[in-house]
Image: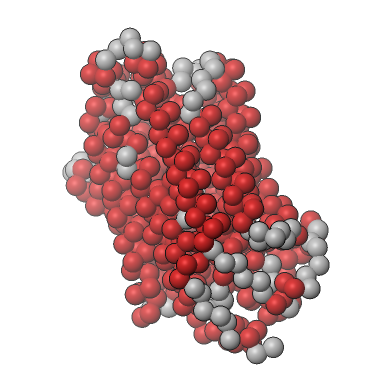
């Protein structure tokens, strides 16, 4: 029988997600906002930075399975995963501080950003692949794995909200200095929480790993290609994360240009509270709902429900009253749905590890777990390109650059916060209804299409339901 997961390992592993996801949230949600509203860059320089992000994230996605092979082939006295978790978090924390601290101008900043962002992605991959690869190795018991995913998702939500909720309320009017302080605090959080994982988790070595041979690059592709359920869930994970990322990435620009620079900080804070509550409550509801409903039925319901909420959001201000209450309510419902879908897909993807082990008598936790990270990184690249393209095409970036000049003057002590907010509002008031509607289209249309594609693939191609997974695990244990 599978040895029960001990409490120290369970809590050290899940709590450890807090700092790492706070760090990831800071970069993924606010690095481009920091650049957009505190750096004076031409449209061409901003476009090059956008291209750099896309290229780096695509490389990062490719690098994920390569890192999985490295981890799979390295066995240290400290453990299979722990050295990479610790090294990755320390290096990544240093780079985060650098990205929000050093401020060369013009093309010098573009070059600095390119090198820094590339290193940020590669060092985060060290930590990310090792951390997620550790998850399926801790237990094969379905209930314990659901519990781990639920608890980890809760602490991920806490980490993300600690950044997403606080940053918008404190940056406007003194953004340059505030971002620098936030980056230092978050970097220290990252190191502290991942140290807890290293010290508190007891790694488990499965029997199928004892005589495992060293893997090569061709072996990685062989492992991917032979697992039809991994292919289906991996592609679905990619499309889901396209839908999952855009709303929060557009949020600050949406509220700035719909309600003004001086008022948006409180509104973004409430919106991120909805993000936190929606995601957190979805984690709490996950073990309850999965007791009474099949995973695929839940996936179908929440995918379609999220699409309906996005459609209503598109019409707010265009037939439906422009109410912050309606917008926040829709945000909560969307984030709840997407939080639940995320946990379903994580569990369903991880279950392909035992599926592969049963069919081929090999277990490759690190390799297969990289598919989730690969999908997240690749979707992030596409999302960043979409966001920046919408900002440039709509003309919103040109207006935001006027605000950037104000924030730079504030950082140099030339303007007071009140002056920055007042002048910024006057600039935003020049935006046209067409510009605002183009932004709204970017927020809604792509996520709806991605949700529909994700659902279609999972319903037609994924076949490991609850009964089938239980059969797989039982057969493996009885060998």
Q: Nearer the viewer, residue 237 or 418?
A: 418
Give the answer, above or below, for where 165 lies relative to 141: above
Is residue 312 in view? no
Count of numbered tags: 0
Q: Quadrant of the C terminus?
A: bottom right
Is residue 407 in view? yes
Residue 177's spot in the image, x, y percent? 39, 24
Q: Is residue 289 left or right of residue 348?
A: left
Looking at the picture, the colour scheme in use is secondary structure
Q: Residue furthest top?
A: 414
At x 46%, y 26%, the residue is: 35
The picture quadrant where one finds residue 295 is bottom left
Q: Is residue 111 left or right of residue 39?
A: right
The picture quadrant where one finds residue 403 is top left
Q: Residue furthest bottom?
A: 478
Q: Nearer the viewer, residue 59 or 473?
A: 473
Q: Nearer the viewer, residue 70 or 79?
A: 79
At x 69%, y 52%, the residue is: 67
Residue 59's spot in the image, x, y percent? 66, 42
Residue 135's spot in the image, x, y percent? 55, 65
At x 47%, y 67%, the residue is: 8
Residue 279's spot in the image, x, y percent? 35, 57
At x 40%, y 49%, the residue is: 159
Give the answer, above or below, for where 268 lies relative to 459: above
Q: Quadrant of the N terminus?
A: bottom right
Give the answer, above or below, for where 416 lies relative to 151: above
């Amino acid at each position: 029988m599978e040895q029960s997961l001990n409490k120290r390992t369970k809590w050290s592993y899940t709590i450890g997600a807090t700092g790492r996801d706070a760090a990831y949230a800071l970069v993924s949600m606010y690095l481009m906002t920091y650049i957009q509203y505190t750096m004076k860059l031409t449209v061409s320089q901003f476009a090059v930075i956008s291209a750099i992000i896309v290229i780096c994230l695509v490389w990062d996605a490719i690098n994920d399975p390569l890192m999985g092979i490295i981890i799979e082939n390295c066995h240290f006295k400290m453990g299979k995963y722990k050295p990479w978790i610790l090294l990755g978090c320390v290096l990544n924390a240093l780079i985060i501080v650098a990205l929000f601290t050093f401020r060369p101008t013009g093309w010098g900043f573009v070059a600095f950003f390119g090198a820094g962002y590339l290193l940020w992605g590669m060092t985060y991959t060290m930590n990310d692949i090792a951390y997620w690869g550790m998850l399926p190795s801790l237990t094969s018991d379905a209930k314990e794995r659901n519990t781990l995913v639920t608890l980890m998702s809760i602490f991920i939500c806490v980490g993300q909200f600690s950044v997403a909720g606080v940053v918008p309320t404190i940056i406007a009017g003194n953004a340059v200095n505030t971002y620098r302080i936030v980056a230092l605090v978050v970097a220290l959080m990252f190191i502290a929480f991942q140290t807890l994982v290293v010290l508190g988790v007891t790694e488990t070595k499965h029997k199928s790993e004892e005589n495992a041979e060293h893997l090569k690059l061709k072996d990685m592709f062989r492992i991917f290609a032979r697992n039809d359920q991994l292919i289906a869930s991996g592609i679905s994970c990619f499309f889901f994360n396209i839908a999952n990322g855009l709303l929060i990435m557009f949020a600050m620009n949406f509220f700035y240009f719909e309600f003004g620079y001086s008022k948006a900080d409180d509104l973004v804070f409430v919106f991120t509270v909805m993000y936190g509550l929606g995601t957190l409550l979805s984690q709490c509801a996950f073990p309850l709902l999965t007791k009474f409903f099949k995973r695929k039925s839940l996936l179908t319901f929440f995918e379609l429900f999220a699409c309906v909420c996005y459609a209503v959001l598109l019409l707010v201000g265009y037939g439906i009253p422009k109410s912050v209450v309606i917008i926040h309510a829709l945000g909560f419902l969307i984030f709840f749905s997407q939080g639940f879908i995320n946990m379903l897909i994580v569990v369903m993807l991880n279950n392909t590890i035992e599926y592969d082990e049963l069919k081929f008598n090999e277990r490759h936790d690190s390799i297969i777990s990289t598919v989730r990270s690969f999908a997240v990184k690749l979707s992030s690249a596409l999302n960043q390109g979409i966001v920046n393209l919408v900002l440039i095409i709509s003309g919103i970036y040109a207006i935001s650059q006027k605000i950037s000049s104000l924030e730079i003057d504030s950082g140099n002590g030339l303007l007071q916060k009140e002056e920055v907010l007042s002048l910024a509002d006057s600039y935003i008031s020049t935006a046209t209804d067409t510009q605002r509607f183009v932004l709204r289209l970017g927020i809604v249309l792509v996520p709806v299409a991605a949700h529909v594609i994700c659902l279609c693939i999972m319903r037609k191609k994924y076949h490991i339901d609850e009964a089938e997974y239980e059969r797989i695990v039982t057969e493996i244990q009885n060998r």
